[in-house]
Image (cartoon, rainbow, N blue to C red):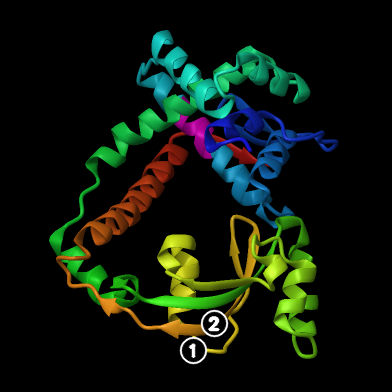
Amino acid sequence: MLTALAAGVLALVAGAVEVDGIAAKVGAETILKSEVYREMQRMRAPESAYNEVRNELIDRKLILKAASESKMTMQDWVVENRLRDIIEKAFDGDRNKLMETLGQQKVSYPEWRQRMKDDMIVAAMRWNVVDKYVVARPSDLRKAYAEHPERYVTGGKVTVSVILLKPEDANLRDEISEALATTDFAELARKYSADIHASDGGVWKDVVPAEVFKPEICEEIAKMPKATLSRWIELDGWSFLLRKDAEVEGTKLSFEEAYDQIEQEVKEAEGKTAYEAWMKRLRSETYIKVF
């Protein structure tokens, strides 16, 4: 399996795209519909995510434009070191494997290299403008601790059953919800779920939610009474349906014990807010037309 480092290869193309045309113009730059659909395929995003993905590509163009205007450069030796690291970790150090993958995807090495370089520029710009200025104020840490006690617990375990649908299967949600009135959850999980425990009826037994699930899933599990179903939760195009089967309550962490976790979460939230403000400013300074 390719690691996350290899995702950049698939970012350029993830299959043939028949529909094309202009999706957006960002200053003098153009984003094609095919680019949006390729990115959606890479992300396994559903059709409903088209606008969101297009907007992310607009943000990327804006950041690269800002980098050019600020004279930011990425030295070739830095780029080459990064490429060697990707080849080592994602392709077992075999450059031929990379070239074979690029050939299968009809992507030239210069195109891939430019994509990787652009990724580095985008990350560097975000660090310089947003991330290095993000701070977690003590009052915000205390507020987060008080408002989300379910996040800061140790020793708690749950057994949950999960039905996970791929983005292209999102249209099956209503069908599955209706079937639950007459069909066992485990049977439906085995039939429909893409979860790694589907063959076991979707059961995740005695797990610490924070260790195996994303925060959005953990929060849903925390507020669910035993033997109840969740709503359908959509994350990155994937659809989750949960049933809480059993629970062993954990011990609440003190503020001091949970400090590192709280700080990380608060910084992530602050960073998101600062990033959105930055994008709003860049958009106000650039002619953007969406088609």
Residue 2 sits in quarter: top right
Magenta-drawn stretch contains 51 = no
Q: Is residue 142 left or right of residue 98?
A: left
Query: Residue 144, image x and y in percent?
Result: 26, 69
Residue, far top: 76
Residue 102 position (above or below residue 286) = above
Q: Describe the element under mark 2 as helix, strand or loop.
A: strand
Query: Residue 21, image x and y in percent?
Result: 78, 34
Front-most of residues 125 and 29: 125
Q: Residue 173: in sight, yes or no?
A: no
Residue 160 position (above or below residue 69) = below
Residue visible at 53% across and 32% down in the picture: 5
Q: Which residue in the protein does label 1 denote? A: 225
Magenta-drawn stretch contains 63 = yes
Residue visible at 49% across and 75% down in the picture: 220
Query: Residue 117, image x and y in percent?
Result: 49, 20
Residue visible at 27% across and 59% down in the picture: 261
> Which numbered disc flags the more N-terminal residue, 1 or 2?
1
* Circle 2: residue type: Lys
Q: Main secondary structure of the magenta part?
A: helix
Label pair 1/2, CB-CB below 8 angstroms: yes
Q: Which residue in the protein does label 2 denote? A: 244
Front-most of residues 257 and 275: 257
Q: CA distance from mark 1 to mark 2?
A: 7 Å
Residue 20 sits in quarter: top right
Magenta segment, which residues?
59-64
Q: Is residue 170 left or right of residue 115?
A: right
Residue, far right: 18
Residue 283 position (above or below residue 256) = above
Query: Residue 97, image x and y in percent?
Result: 66, 20
Q: Pointer 1: residues within 10 angstroms few (<14), some, or many (20+)?
A: some
Q: Describe the element under mark 1 as helix, strand or loop.
A: loop
